[in-house]
Image (cartoon, rainbow, N blue to C red):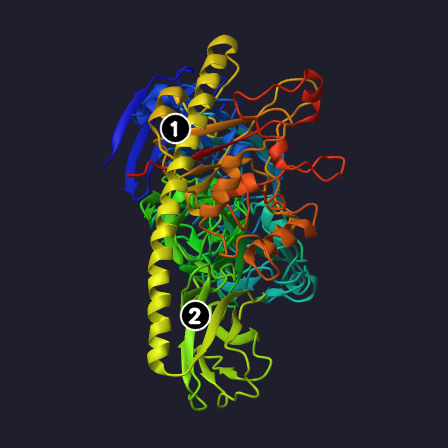
Amino acid sequence: MYLFLFYPSALAFPVMIVVLIALCFTDGALSQIRYSVPEEAEHGTLVGNIAEDLGLDLTKLASRRFQVVPSSRTPYLEVNLENGVLFVNEKIDREQICKQSASCQLNMEVFLENPLELFRVEIEVVDINDNPPSFPETDITVEISESATPGTRFPLESAFDPDVGSNALRTYDITTNNYFYLDVQTQTDGNKFAELVLEKPLDREQQAAHRYVLTAVDGGQPPRTGTALLVVKVLDSNDNVPVFEQPVYTVSLSENVPVGTLVIQLNATDLDEGLNGEIVYSFSNHISSRVKELFGIDPRTGRIEVRGEVDFEESSLYQIFVQAKDLGPNAVPAHCKVLVKVADLNDNAPEITFSTVKESVSEKAAPGTVIALLSVTDRDAEENGQIHVEILGDVPFKLKSSFRNYFTIVTDGLLNREQADSYSVTVVARDKGTPSLASSKSIRVQVSDENDNAPTFTQSVYDVYVTENNVPGAYIHAVTALDPDIGQNALITYSILECDIQGMSVKTYVSINEETGYLYALRSFDYEQLKDFTFMVRAKDSGAPELSSNATVKVIIVDQNDNAPLVLAPLGKNGTAKEPLPRSAEPGYLVTRVVAMDADDGENARLSYSIQRGNDNGMFRMDWRTGELRTARRVSAKRDPHQQYDLVIEVRDHGQPPLSSSASILVMLVDSMAEGRGVGDKVGTSKAKDGALDLTLILIIALGSVSFIFLLVMIVLAVRCQKDKKLNIYTCLTSDCCLGCSSCCSRQGRSRKKKLSKADIMLVQSTVNVSGPGTAQVPVEESGSFGSHHQNQNYCYQTKHQRTELSYLVERPRRVNSSAFQEADLVSSKDSGHGDSEQGDSDHDATNRGHSSGADLFSNCTEECKALGHSDRCWMPSFVPSDGRQGLDYRSNLHVPGMDSVPDTERGRGFASSFRVDIPETA
């Protein structure tokens, strides 16, 4: 579709015609617009408005980066990038730019971004008649023999007019005369030349020279002329003239042939003899100067050779006019024309020019996204100028032909930055000549990251083994997730998905470092109460949108040998069982069977039985696997004078270290089984009485203990509430974690006491700040065996049930001697059953371990600790002074409201810490 627009010329030149050709192509628009401008136009002359002629929005030129392709800029024209006006920047001389070419055109490319639109602007420079014809010389001399016959032609030196078209040289005129007239002829290239034709025989004796004015006229309006003086000298005759074999010769010559290459060997003959028959060759006067530069002729031989560089791209055809003239007097020259056709060679490689290139492309870019715009040209012709363009290598890009010799590089499929973050795209242009020539250019395309990869755990299921009785807050394992993205898209945070374990949130059991994925135990696990539990962890990146993945963590509690065997049978009064043995019993007689159990598991619960003492004479043997006590021999009056045997049976597990318990069995010799049954009945009656007595005693002690504890608690609460009203120094009413026990007076009055176990206590983060000089935040110390990757965290202990809260404020050293603590030890759930600690007892083991290292967190296992539900393993953290000295027993840091105050001088020697023990309400 053609659209003609007319603009008035500022210099009153012919009207300029604007031709707009609009073409569309995928991924961008490409249009062509054509203007014309007369040469010699002054600076600032308006050529046209590109933006308006193309229908572009002038207000968006700046935002869309309207600009000229750098490789297409010309000094003669300029574009106002703000309004799209195309104007003359320098005076244009068409003859200087395009020489004698019939068409003179300047090309320019402009483009817009977002989206990409390319426009080709063609500006035709219109010739004006600003040059008159001119002759090479002002005086032209022609020698003609008087014997020349009418009709003989004499070529004249041509005039030159640099203008073209209608302004070029049109004709020649000569002064009116009786002897000559001009015959104006047109060459194949359109140039005009004149031949002087003899119309009437000359007579040298009458007139030896003739002078005429030779005029060259162009076709401009008004026409311009150029003149020269033509002098015709009349010579004496030479009867014969040289003759060429043919008037026109046609030869073919390859471009770029070396200097000295033969073009043609001319041969003219003359029938005369001597000097009149000796021929001299030369170029005619009217050939162009460029032909004289490229070719030369040997005057004697007529050999035409190459003298300069012949280039097909400059001209594909040359006309050489040759004359042959003898050396005789009054010689008449003969003329011929040599047409030299230049054959194209593939001597120009294709040229690749990138107009625009994107620096990066998103890995989510759709197939077909434009990456770059380029053009390819070849100055050769025909097959030598036919170009094949391709992209080298296996890259996800392809070429699309857009318009003429323009191509776009677009994505050919989806990109993946994780596989390749950049590509080197090499474009190769190859022509079809022989041999084929090629050129290449490369660009680097960066692939920008998108959040298209979710974090992936290194394992889908993590099995974490944690030994029971672990330190609360200890590092137990690390989960790791990987994200192949980069930057924020690869920044991973870890979290634990909410779930319940035995009715409580998993986040009361374990915590996770959201940056490193380190898992920490928030409580000390007891294998006998919880053998394993499972929860989910999530890894989430920081991209948009956020992506995440989950993994399963199974925590397996590993049993420790922390429970001594418990003897279930036989039972007796005061821990001693009585069993009868007939004197007539045979060897292997089953006296009794010791039955024991161990709360541990595996090897820690595998028991073996042995007689520890009382079997000095070898009367009995014990099956170490079943616990059966049998006679090893017959009863002998001589060897067995005693009426009874006091045996101590030891039950030992196979843990490391092993734990043991003992049972006392009194074996009484009887004469018969009837007597044995009597003894048994007595023993049974005695046992029943003792049992009734023991039950009554236990009830009395329990009621007395409860009454005493209740009275003690009431006194403590009264004193504490009274102090709170007066001094307002207790912060437990407003704390959030460890000291968060609001309405403690009223709530403690309604709560009941319950024996605690370590499963009732969990670890929560807390920081306690102590006011006063020299005080600081006191963290719970952790064992150094866990490594440097643990972060120091402050913890306090709280139980599962929070309906009743009992808060202790430890603020100054004091020693508490309370019988309630001592009585509570009798009902401890973790006591081995031996009462006081003995060698091999769990109490004794814990105590020994507590004293083995001053830095052990569980060294202060005291009576008060046992009263809080930690009888044989006190795992409440203890404070170790910074000066390295063994810390005081923690009872010195326990403050019971209502007790005597310590003088102010002792306050500086203590440290402040807090813990909360929540006592569940019992039925």
Compared with 349, 608 (above or below) is below
Contact (Cβ within 8 Å) of mark 2 with mark 1: no
Mark count: 2
| Residue type of the residue flagged with mark 1 | Ser
750 versus 328 height, above or below: above
Name the image quarter holding residue 48: top left
Q: Tag on residue 809?
A: none
| Residue 572 makes an appearance in the image | yes
**Nearest to viewer (mark 2 / mark 1):** 2
Residue nearest the observer in this picture, 380 or 126: 380
- For this rendering, which residue is in front, 768 or 723? 723
Disc 1 target residue: 36
Question: What residue does disc 2 label?
Answer: 578
Disc 2 element? strand
Q: Residues within 10 Å of mark 2 (few under 14, many from 20)?
A: many
Residue 260 coordinates in the image, percent (x, y):
67, 63
Q: Earlier in the sequence, mark 2 or mark 1?
A: 1
Separation of residues labelled 2 and 1 (CA atoms): 132 Å
Residue 868 placement, left or right of 639: left
Quadrant of residue 12 within the rendered picture: top left
907 or 509, nearer to the observer? 907
Q: Residue furthest left?
A: 1
Q: Which amino acid, mark 2?
A: Lys
